[in-house]
Image (cartoon, coloured by chain):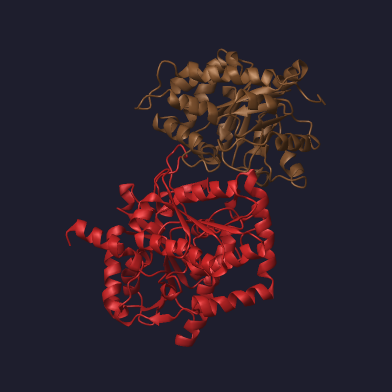
Amino acid sequence: MTVQQPNSFRTGPDERGHFGIYGGRFVAETLMPLILDLEKAYLQAKTDPKFQKEMDGHLATYVGRPSPLYFADRLTQHCGGAKIYFKREELNHTGAHKVNNVLGQIMLALRMGKTRIIAETGAGMHGVATATLCAKFGLPCIVYMGAVDVERQKPNVLRMKILGAEVRPVESGARTLKDAMNEALRDWVTNVSDTFYCIGTVAGPHPYPAMVRDFQSIIGRETREQMQVAEGRLPDSLIACIGGGSNAMGLFHPFLDERAIEIYGVEAAGHGLKSGKHAASIAGGKPGVLHGNRTYLLMDDDGQIEEAHSISAGLDYPGIGPEHAWLKDMGRVKFLSATDDEAVAAFQLCSKLEGIIPALEAAHALARVPEIAARKPKDHLMVVNLSGRGDKDLASVEAFVGSKGR
Amino acid sequence: MSTRIEKRFAVLKKEGRAALVTFTMAGDPDYETSLAIAKALPSAGADIIELGMPFTDPMADGPAIQAAGLRALKSGQRMTKTLAMVREFRKTDDETPIVLMGYYNPIYIYGNDRFLSDAKAAGVDGLIIVDLPPEEDEELCLPALKAGLNFIRLATPTTDDKRLPTVLTNTSGFVYYVSITGITGAAAPDTGKVMTAVARIKRHTKLPVAVGFGVKTAEHARAIAEGADGVVVGSALIDTLRQSLDKNGKPGPGAVNAVTKLVSVLAQGVRSARRVAAE
């Protein structure tokens, strides 16, 4: 298939929020005036030096940015090819990349005079980041979390409660991330006047996908500078895990127009792509409309959304950000997948070789690293986005390994 | 050529009363029962029938309608069966307007052009698609109007005077005023506020304005019918149907009657309203 490639991959979305056929604003009328307001407020903030300066200050002293670019020596030796670097997003305050976006959105909420924050969360990292910044800025925070995820991510539930947030378990549907997002949207429709919906990934109605991408792009911008310092040039390949895709988009976006750079997104293949129990919406889905945007979705032939399956709660979502869907169709990003088994093996490997316990989400990206790295020459520079730390996953991994008798 | 919806509102205007618009879910709790309910609605007093197209992720609906959709899907309801249900209904009733209401994805996956021509052929008169605001009119609204279907839009308390013209531009048939900011089946709206909002919308359009979300009793229906051109009742009917189901979700012998009985009561409420200012 030959695709007409654009002059730049970095100019989207258009003024209506479309990345090619993807994106858009598929929301109930009650929410339309709100997202139009949000778009206006965001565009103003984006070009306001005061807003940027304040955000940079918080990123430096509260989040702890820049996050290091780390040469993973022993993993490099183990793979026997490319030089592997980790972008250490797991060292951010709250333990994942999520905080980059939440800081921006909470500052925007304050600027818009909103007094109540709601969020959805899967693995709980976005919920923790939201609860954290709500504590810092003195805002009430309600986090919707699927009841299944509440069970498998207990440490994060506890963390959110300690931070003063109210965690509302969602009992509808599959009781995971998708259902948490439905419930957050229902809350938003009900409490339009005072509530700001802090979405955790590059999905949802315009302007969320572009706004979250912009807040997360600091990952890629820092990586450019840091690689220049470390190696005197830009990397040759980038790899990140993808659920909704915010850590991946944050790393990828500043590099999209350097077309020689190979870019890989790794979806969660759960029990395997052929098992029907996975969360790989690019590999196993097709374009449809859900949660405010058109994108690749897991669904049946009647257009009913199917449940995603992944050991990683943060990837357990039947969709993907619309810009990723477009980059897939354009052929700019190559999409791979990793099964639960492969992710857990990579989780163990990284912990033992590098002394870094990665989140199960990031372990999906790590799972594809050895085979790609092995094929590359020794001067090939590869960056893996280590998007989160694995403390929250210890119980899940122990149970998984126990069930496999290993 | 006017649609069944336009004709129905014209007739009711002459009668000097508001329309009772009922919402039930196609396939809830199964195809046969939902068809039997639909067929019984007009004689019970429903003037316009809204049929829900079930969807797994109804993000603007409350627990009652969410559960109804899941019951329907579990019983095997699909888009093809919803359209078949309308065709079946039309065999014995060629006058009562039917509006399909739901979310965009099942239509998009069915294929927009195929859906519009099949819906029109089946005897559907209008569409209400919750997650298609005017900003996405090119998707389905404009093709639907071209195909001769009404595209009924929701206006809400957040739709201010500045936005109303945008919302009304391609709206046809009637305007559905969502009386609360919230999900279906939530708290009952304050009637005074609703009347002010209806009057406000009427300053912008000649289309009939129907009011829904939170209407549960005859008294409430009567109060709304004094100012609006239509009263929409959904969650209350679905709750009544649910209460008639047995432990396994199967309808008891009185399921259809339970729903039509409530419809009759609501219809009396609507018909007893003293209309203010027939403009």
Residue at horizontal 82 percent and vertical 26 percent from the top: B279
A239 to B129, vertically: above or below: below
Residue at horizontal 72 percent and vertical 35 percent from the top: B192
Closest to the observer, A398 or B247 = B247
Q: Is residue B76 left or right of residue B138?
A: left
In the rendered image, which quarter is residue B170 located in?
top right
A58 to A304, vertically: above or below: below
Quadrant occupied by the N terminus of chain B: top right
Closest to the observer, A197 or A294 = A197
| Chain painted red | A
Residue A203: image location, x then y, percent: 53, 56
Residue B191: image location, x then y, percent: 69, 33
Count of numbered labels shown in the rendering: 0
Residue B75: image location, x then y, percent: 40, 29
Closest to the observer, B47 or B245 = B245
In the rendered image, which quarter is residue B111 located in?
top right
| Chain painted brown | B
- Mark yes or no: residue B197 visible: yes
